[in-house]
Amino acid sequence: MIFLVPARAGSKRLPGKNTRMFCGLPLWMWSIMTACRVATDADIIIASSDDFSILESTWGMQRSADLCKDGTLTSEVVADVWLRFQMHDALCLLQPTSPTRSDSLVRMMLAHGGSCRSVTNGEPNGQCYVYRREMTMADVETERGHDIDTLEQFEAAERHMMERFK
Amino acid sequence: MTNDKETIRLLKAEIHDLQQSSIDHMDDLNLRAIVGIAVREAINRSSTIAEAARMLGIDRGTLYDHMRKLGIEARLRCVPVA
C-alpha cells in the first residue's frame, strides 16, 4: 500500500496552506501521522510536493512542475505516483486539508477491500480515497469533516482539533 | 540518582508506552500528548536532532521549542548519538 499526501506549494485562497502550522505541526504532517499510525512495515508513505520544506523532510517526493498547476487533477498525481511504485497494488490518498479525520475512518476504508472514497450524503468529502487496480469506486458514508480551503476554515478546524483533544 | 543507562531504559519504556497509546487509544489523548508522541517517536527513530526535525517536517528551532515544552530536552542528552 502506498500512502500518498499530495501537498503542493501553491494555494490561491490561503498561500502556504499545507505548510502552515496547525496545532503545533505543519498541516500536511497531520496526514502523514495518520498514515504512520495505520500503515504496516511493508507500506510506503509519501508527500508529493514542490515545496522545499516538504521535500527536505523524510517523506518528501519531488512532483514535476507539470503536476503543480492550479488545474492539475488529483487523479493525475495519483497516476504519477503509482507509475513510480508499480510493485504496490493499492494507494491510499490522504489530503492534507482534512487533518481532523480519524484513524478508524482510514482503517475502515482500507478494510473495505476495493476502491472506495469517503462521502457525506453521497458527496465526496475529501477525507480518504483508496485506489486499487479495479476501476469501480464505491462510496463509504462517513461524517463530514473539515475540508480546509480558506483561512476561516483553517482556524475553524484548528479550534475543533483543540476542543476535541483538550 | 540514576545513571545514563538507567535513564535510557526508563526513556525507552516510556516511549514504548506512548507508542502503544498512540495505536490503541488515540481518542483518549489530548493534543499535547499527540504532538508529544510524534516528537518522541521522531527522536527515538533518529540519530540526530536534524533528522528528527526532518521526520516531523519542521526546522530544528521548532523541534527544540516542542522539546522544551514537553520537558524532554534534558533526557535527550542521555541518549547516545549513533
Image (cartoon, grey):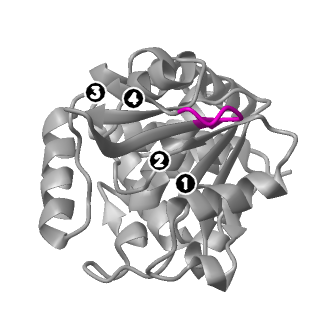
Instruction: Tell me whether the residue at label 2 lies in contact with that at label 4, contact meaning CB atoms closer than 8 angstroms.
Output: no
**Residue A5 numbered tag:** 1
Name the one closer to the observer, B69 or A88.
A88
Type of amino acid under label 1: Val
Label 2, on which residue? A31
Q: Nearer the viewer, residue A143 or B48?
A: A143
Examine the rendered structure and indicate whether residue A38 appears above or below residue A147.
above
Q: Chain of mark 1?
A: A
For the residues marked 2 and 1, what is the alpha-carbon distance in whole angstroms? 7 Å
Question: Which label belongs to residue A139?
Answer: 4
The amino acid on which the numbered mark 2 sits, given as a three-letter code, is Ser
Question: Is residue A17 visible to us here?
Answer: yes
SS majority, magenta:
loop
Start-end of magenta stretch: A131-136
Tell me the element at label 1.
strand
Tell me how far mark 4 sits from mark 1, CA to CA. Answer: 20 Å
- Cα distance between the residues tagged 3 and 2: 17 Å
Task: Determine the residue positioned at 72% across, 62% down.
Answer: A80
Q: Are marks 2 and 1 in contact (CB under 8 Å)?
A: yes
Pointer 2 or 4: first along the chain: 2
Q: Is residue B1 visible?
A: no
Residue sitting at x 61%, y 20%: B13
Q: Percent from the top left, x then y, of residue B47?
A: 77, 52
Residue underneath mark 3 = A142
Quick check: do tags 4 and 3 share a chain? yes
Indicate left or right for B6 with A88 as reference.
left
- The residue furthest front is A136
Real-space CA distance between mark 2 and mark 4, rounded to the nearest whole angstrom: 21 Å
Chain ID, mark 2: A
Q: Are marks 4 and 1 on the same chain?
A: yes
Cα distance between the residues tagged 4 and 3: 9 Å
Quarter of the rendering containing residue B25: top left
